Amino acid sequence: MKITHSIHTYGRKRVFVRDVMAIGDAVVFLISASIASFLRFDDFVVPDILYFPFIIISVFYFAFMISMRAYTRLDLSFLRFGIVRLTISLICAYALLFSLSYFTKSSNEISRLWMGYNFVACLILFTSYRLIFGYILYKTGAIAKLRPEFSVIYSTSCRNVMDAIIAAADTHRINVMKCIELPELSADNHTEAQVEVEMALLRRSVPDVLILALSDEDRSRFSALLPLISAMPSEILEFSTLTTDSLKSERDKINMSSGQPNEWVVVAGLPFVRSAAQPLSGRGWWIKQLEDILLGVFLIVLFSPVMIFATLGVKLTSPGPVLYRQLRHGFNGKEIGVLKFRSMYAECCDPDTSGELSQVKRGDTRVTRFGLFLRRTSLDELPQLFNVLKGEMSLVGPRPHATNQYALYQEKVDTYFSRHRVRPGITGWAQVNGWRGETDTDEKIRQRIACDLYYIRHWSIWFDIRILFLTLLSGFANKNAF
């Protein structure tokens, strides 16, 4: 059993600022090269013959910076070490370049005076940039806000856990944002209702790390609220007094597909079991957001003729609106209005006249003839590209389910709500593996959820590209789409 003394998250805002610092270093490299060219050649444009040495120096510099974890810490107490690391990285980069040019006998082609100017300019600008950046963070108080945000839900009998986390906040450089104490059995209904309100506020705040220190009695009493917590995109740590051997025996009883961990985490000197890792941790969030925006705009332009054709087809074949908006559970369990081209008769899409809408079945009489074509080719999903641009959905992710189906899925799969830890997608790992369409059996429900959880645990930009590619090959037309 693996034991670690650190958490897996550094806070998304913190990681974003670190990436901004790395981008700033790249900009400094470009400015330094222009300054060196002006001092050496009276021209800000870098000569063609120096392009390759300039690129080599940049690559070596960032390689050394990353290997020394120079972009990991932002605390002012470590700022001086950041300056030392960038100086070492710069010296090593230049040393490697000169060694490479010596052994390849190309040193005569490099302007040594330009390299000297560039080195000095880089060193001055890098150091000044770090000092100014650190000063601004310190004066504005932003450096404290960049710490990972913790929240604690605890039973009265586990108050010592909450006290220990708060006492260790400065030592571990964390911010304790919210602490929720579960009421005792003797508490009135008003107190328990207040807990539900605080839980709802906690889900909206989305801390980086959520710590659970609950007694067995409170786990049973609040069993209806705890599954909702699993939808939060936070790293969830559960306080445990189990030994390593007893923890292993307990884990044998757990369904491993639920994403249970295989390690303990020690925070503030206390043992915790990681029950959920932060999905898309670090820079994964903004990389996926950038992917959705760029590809979303591209796909809207690419499929605009198809959407115009679908609009005319819906309008000409049946009366009523072109688009249909259905309430579904989205990111963190929030309800969103998912757009689709209307594939059913207008009166069948209105819950006030047709009652609660059920899943479409094969041969469903509510579906129009043109709507059947749209559904079989999945073209009815194209308006969801606008949900993607609004930030409600992603191109790739677990497919959102209708809100009236939540109870059914939760009853069949205990870890169902964990699929809401990322934004829902237009397509997903379950869909390209054939698990789409009507969920009329327990096996279909379990397999679909298992694929969704697998995607969340193994997300990468290349995984998204793979799913999009498979969707283009086979996802538009599927035997389970009707």
Image: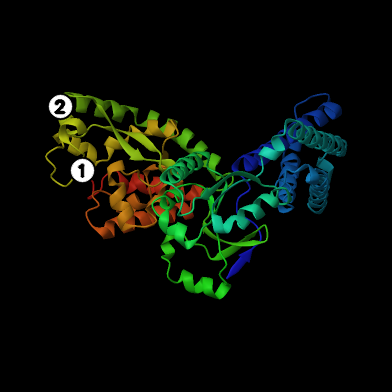
The three-letter amino acid code for the residue at tag 2 is: Ser
Q: Quadrant of the N terminus?
A: bottom right
The amino acid beneath tag 1 is: Ser
Which is more toward the observer, 141 or 436? 141
- Residue 175 x/y as whole percent: 65, 44
Horizontal arrangement in the rendering, residue 444 relative to residue 141 (left or right) = left
Q: How is the image coloured?
A: rainbow
Give whichever of 253, 361 is nearer the camera. 253
Depth check, mark 1 against mark 2: the one in front is 1
Q: Label 2's element?
A: loop
1 and 2 marks in contact (CB < 8 Å)? no
Local packing at callout 2 (Cα closer than 10 Å; few below 14, some 14-19, many 20+) is some
- Residue displayed at 78% across by 37% down: 130
Decide which of tag 1 and tag 2 comes sooner along the chain.
2
Q: Is residue 462 above or below residue 141?
A: below
Q: Name the mark on residue 345.
A: none
Q: Is residue 258 visible?
A: yes
Depth check, front residue: 327 or 476: 327
From the top left corner, tell me how far across and down residue 280 is, in percent.
52, 48
Secondary structure of residue under mark 1: loop
Residue matched to label 2: 318
Q: Image check: 57 left or right of 283?
A: right
Q: Percent x, y for residue 45?
A: 75, 27
Q: Which residue is mark 1?
A: 358
Q: Residues within 10 Å of mark 1 (few under 14, many from 20)?
A: few
Left or right position of 299 against 23? left
Q: Mark yes or no: residue 350 visible.
A: no
Residue visible at 55% across and 45% down? 284
Who's the residue at 13% across and 45% down the image? 363
Q: Quadrant of the C terminus?
A: top left
Alpha-carbon distance for marks 1 and 2? 21 Å
